[in-house]
Amino acid sequence: GNSVTQMEGPVTLSEEAFLTINCTYTATGYPSLFWYVQYPGEGLQLLLKATKADDKGSNKGFEATYRKETTSFHLEKGSVQVSDSAVYFCAPRPMDSSYKLIFGSGTRLLVRP
Amino acid sequence: KAGVTQTPRYLIKTRGQQVTLSCSPISGHRSVSWYQQTPGQGLQFLFEYFSETQRNKGNFPGRFSGRQFSNSRSEMNVSTLELGDSALYLCASSPGTGNYEEQYFGPGTRLTVT
């Protein structure tokens, strides 16, 4: 079946540190891949996406590359800020007729000044 | 463009009651999906509507139902509420024409069942 595995949180970093949040997935066909972010008390915001192998999605300094051979879509940022503190969700969208996103458990990021 | 809106933002209900939540998608979007978010189960897909038809349904009991109107606005209904239905209910909209398109989420409705 379809599933997503994200690294356990919380991830605690100092400001300006390098961030990696790992994500691997199992999904039908050739999925589209998304990262969403959720700030406290809010809904999910789309952070970035990639739709084919070796595509790199990027936004607000965050990047993730679609790795078909390892079925991974790791999120990276070179220098995190306190305002990046949030929960991050990796979400493939399988190429079936379900039209749904498959969410991982989410990774909480805490950035300290 | 205005984003996805959900009403109400907060609800408190008693076990056994029923509740209706509303979602207005981004203008021009014809697909509305609903998700339930709880600390224990995470984000789970409830159902998806496109052009007033339910296209897909997740693994939830029949107490959870929904519908979509001709203007693409959607409602979901939960009957005979249980304590375990306490959750953040999120809706998401998209054009609905392909698997590559992103879904845009509303702020959610926080339902508390006492």
Image: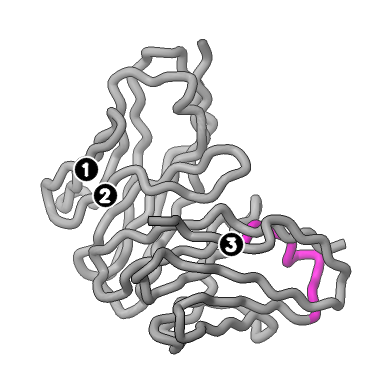
Label 2 CA crowd tier, 10 Å (few <14, some 14–19, many 20+)? many
Q: The residue tagged with tag 1: helix, strand or loop?
A: strand
Q: Could you tell me residue A50's position as x and y percent? A: 21, 51
Are the residues under badges 3 and 1 in a single subunit? no
Neighbour tally class for label 3: few under 14, some 14-19, many 20 plus, Cα within 10 Å? many
Q: Which residue is mark 1?
A: A57
Disc 2 to disc 1: CB gap under 8 Å: yes
Image quarter for residue B56? Answer: bottom left
Q: Give the label on residue B6, or none.
A: 3
Q: Specify the amino acid type for callout 3.
A: Gln
Determine whether, in the image, residue B57 is placed left or right of residue A25: right
Chain of the residue under the numbered disc 3 shown in the image: B
Label 1 CA crowd tier, 10 Å (few <14, some 14–19, many 20+): many
- What segment carries the magenta color? B80-89
Give the mark toward the camera: 3 or 1.
Answer: 3
Q: Residue at x 64, y 63 (%)?
A: B7
Taking depth in this image into account, of A68 and B2 the one nearest to the observer is B2
Q: Position of residue B33 (x, y in %)?
A: 47, 71
Indicate whether residue B81 is drawn in magenta.
yes
SS at circle 2: strand
Q: Is residue A43 visible?
A: yes
Label 2 – label 3 distance at C-alpha: 24 Å
Looking at the rendered image, the quarter that the N terminus of chain A falls into is bottom left
Amino acid carrying mark 2 in the image:
Lys
B58 sits left or right of A79 in the view: right
Q: Is residue B39 above or below residue A37?
A: below
Q: Nearer the viewer, residue A57 or A103?
A: A57
Residue A71 x, y percent position in the rendering: 24, 52
Q: Is residue B74 above or below residue B13?
A: below
For disc 2, the marked residue is A49
Q: Chain of mark 2?
A: A
